[in-house]
């Protein structure tokens, strides 16, 4: 669990003091992913870098797992926090295996244990260990390098992960793929993740909570669906985009709006959706077929329920407290 | 021709002079590495100090070696070593400093800041970061600086023949004073070959010590 209390950073510049982070307070529960979101210069990266003390706070407290980070030696602290940066930063003079083993080596693990851990992580990321362990970073594609950057951050099994626009250097297709992979990994690993992004779509996809920043201040701290349904002010509304209702559709599954049981007027062999698909599919089918109702079918083709326009509208009008699941 | 037969008849003497020459150069460069590389690493911490040190270094380089010998002779004669091996080594050391300090400094500063950021963020201490990341990556450029220092020193040591330090420059100085073209050419040829041989050997070493992942990839 990570808690920030009135965290502040003021820089002395030639033009006078500049407040980069202004009394920011929020709490991230264990196993949750919090995305720090906002435009350039809003203080989200500075906030992240104060957590692993790459930037020294001017005032305020950071508590990780019940310990005030001020009471811990910065170098020791950083070895307990995974860190992924946008430029990836794999050390070119080390093999993939050695790169992954950097923090374990700093912590005194022996060679065999480091190697096993590297193999384990490569396998988890669907990169054949025999093929990749002894490769050098200059022999990797961008997507592979980014995955190994994540593996390196996870190597010592830290409870906390700090990620600074980690997928920003990838092309959009690769980015989608690695985001989905990371979400899948998170379901098993349950790390506490702080993730900096300037992309609302990435935030909506990845976050359990979004902390949206503007000019150093925390403007809103809420689950994605809540933020999309109830933006705190005009800045947030314009940042999330005027299509925010459409964005909410991906967060809601058919199961949540489905009425169980077959209904005669909805043709069982017409357009249908599955219970675990999201509402984007429902909206698409509504529009493509000019209908207001759809059948829900299970994997084996049985009709298990139906979805109506009214049910969708009712769900969207709710407080937006739904889980992504 | 005459020079060739001169060389063939005087191989032992040429060998001795070469060894004298190498002893001056290797001691001078050896000490310059021990002082210059740590200094080059240290000045990466402060831009202002670095600028000052490099500026002083370049001023030293502009002093003609004959003049530097001239300054060293009265000083060192107080301890009985005004001429000969010691002033030659000291002067060569002075000229070896700047290439080594400057290349070390530049090489480490040119390490990608993202790598430094990643290393610090992962919890490496300063010595660990230097030893495991920055110096291995900087090593090829540092060795290139040592190569420059060696080649410069071979030239400086040739002039040291005039203050009794021995070495291959004696063939040149005697060739001039005795108007003997054979000795002159012998000196010039052997010095040239020595410089080329040293440069290539160090180039080989530079390539060997470049970490595999840092070598330019074969297309």
Image: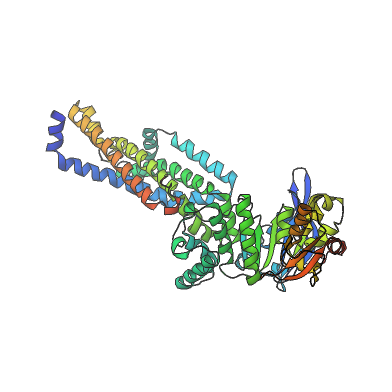
User: In terms of image quadrants, where is residue B1?
Assistant: top left
Q: Is residue A193 left or right of residue A107?
A: right
Q: Residue at x 31, y 35 (%)?
A: B159
Work out which quarter of the rendered image holds the C terminus of chain B and state it: top left
Q: Is residue A61 visible?
A: no
- Picture layout, residue A269 above or below residue B33: below
Q: Nearer the viewer, residue A104 or A272?
A: A272
User: In terms of image quadrants, where is residue A154?
Assistant: bottom right
Q: Residue at x 86, y 57 (%)?
A: A232
Q: Nearer the viewer, residue B186 or A292?
A: A292
Q: Residue at x 47, y 58 (%)?
A: A94
Q: Nearer the viewer, residue A193 or B107?
A: A193
Image position, residue B135 (x, y; %): 47, 54
- Picture layout, residue A109 above or below residue B211: below
Image position, residue B180 (x, y; %): 18, 27
Image position, residue A7 (x, y; %): 77, 61
User: In terms of image quadrants, where is residue B5?
Assistant: top left
Q: Nearer the viewer, residue A25 or A266?
A: A266
């Amino acid at each position: 669990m990570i808690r920030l209390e009135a965290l502040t950073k003021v820089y002395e510049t030639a033009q006078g003091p500049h407040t980069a982070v202004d009394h920011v307070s929020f709490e991230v529960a264990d196993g949750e992913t919090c995305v720090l979101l906002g435009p350039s210069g809003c203080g989200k990266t500075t906030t992240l870098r104060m957590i692993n003390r790459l930037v020294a706070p001017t005032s305020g407290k950071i508590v990780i797992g019940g310990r005030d980070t001020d009471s811990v030696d910065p170098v020791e602290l950083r070895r307990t926090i995974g860190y992924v940066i946008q430029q990836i930063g794999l050390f070119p003079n080390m093999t993939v295996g050695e790169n992954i083993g950097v923090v374990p080596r700093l912590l005194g693990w022996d060679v065999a244990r480091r190697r096993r851990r590297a193999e384990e992580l490569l396998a988890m990321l669907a990169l054949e260990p025999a093929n990749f362990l002894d490769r050098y970073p200059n022999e990797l594609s961008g997507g592979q390098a980014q995955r190994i950057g994540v593996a390196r951050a996870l190597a010592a099994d830290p409870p906390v992960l700090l990620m600074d626009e980690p997928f920003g250097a990838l092309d959009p297709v690769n980015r989608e793929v690695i985001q989905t992979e990371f979400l899948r990994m998170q379901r098993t690993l349950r790390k506490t993740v702080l993730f900096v992004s300037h992309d609302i779509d990435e935030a909506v996809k990845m976050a359990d909570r979004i902390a949206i920043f503007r000019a150093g201040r925390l403007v809103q701290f809420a689950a994605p669906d809540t933020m999309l349904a109830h933006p705190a002010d005009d800045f947030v509304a314009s940042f999330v985009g005027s299509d925010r209702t459409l964005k909410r559709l991906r967060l809601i599954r058919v199961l949540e709006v489905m009425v169980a049981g077959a209904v005669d007027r909805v043709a069982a062999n017409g357009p249908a959706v599955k219970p675990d698909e999201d509402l984007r599919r429902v909206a698409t089918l509504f529009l493509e077929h000019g209908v207001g109702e759809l059948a829900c079918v299970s994997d084996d083709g049985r009709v298990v329920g139906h979805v109506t326009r009214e049910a969708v509208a009712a769900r969207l009008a709710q407080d937006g407290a739904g889980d992504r699941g | 021709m005459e020079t060739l037969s001169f060389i063939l008849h005087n191989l032992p003497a040429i060998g001795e002079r070469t060894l004298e020459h190498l002893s001056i150069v290797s001691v001078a460069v050896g000490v310059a590495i021990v002082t210059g590389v740590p200094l080059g690493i240290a000045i990466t911490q402060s831009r202002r100090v670095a600028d000052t040190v490099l500026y002083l270094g370049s001023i030293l380089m502009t002093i003609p070696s004959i003049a530097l010998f001239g300054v060293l002779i009265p000083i060192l004669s107080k301890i009985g070593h005004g001429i000969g091996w010691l002033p030659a080594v000291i002067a060569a050391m002075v000229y070896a400093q700047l290439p080594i300090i400057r290349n070390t400094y530049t090489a480490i500063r040119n390490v990608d800041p993202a790598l430094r950021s990643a290393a610090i963020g992962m919890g490496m201490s300063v010595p660990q970061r230097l030893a495991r990341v920055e110096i291995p990556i900087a090593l090829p450029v540092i060795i290139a600086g040592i190569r420059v220092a060696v080649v410069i020193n071979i030239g400086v040591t040739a002039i040291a023949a005039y203050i009794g330090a021995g070495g291959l420059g004696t063939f040149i100085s005697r060739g001039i004073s005795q108007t003997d073209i054979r000795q002159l050419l012998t000196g010039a040829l052997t010095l040239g070959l020595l410089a080329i041989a040293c440069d290539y050997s160090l180039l080989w070493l530079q390539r060997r010590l470049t970490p595999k992942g840092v070598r330019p990839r074969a297309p």
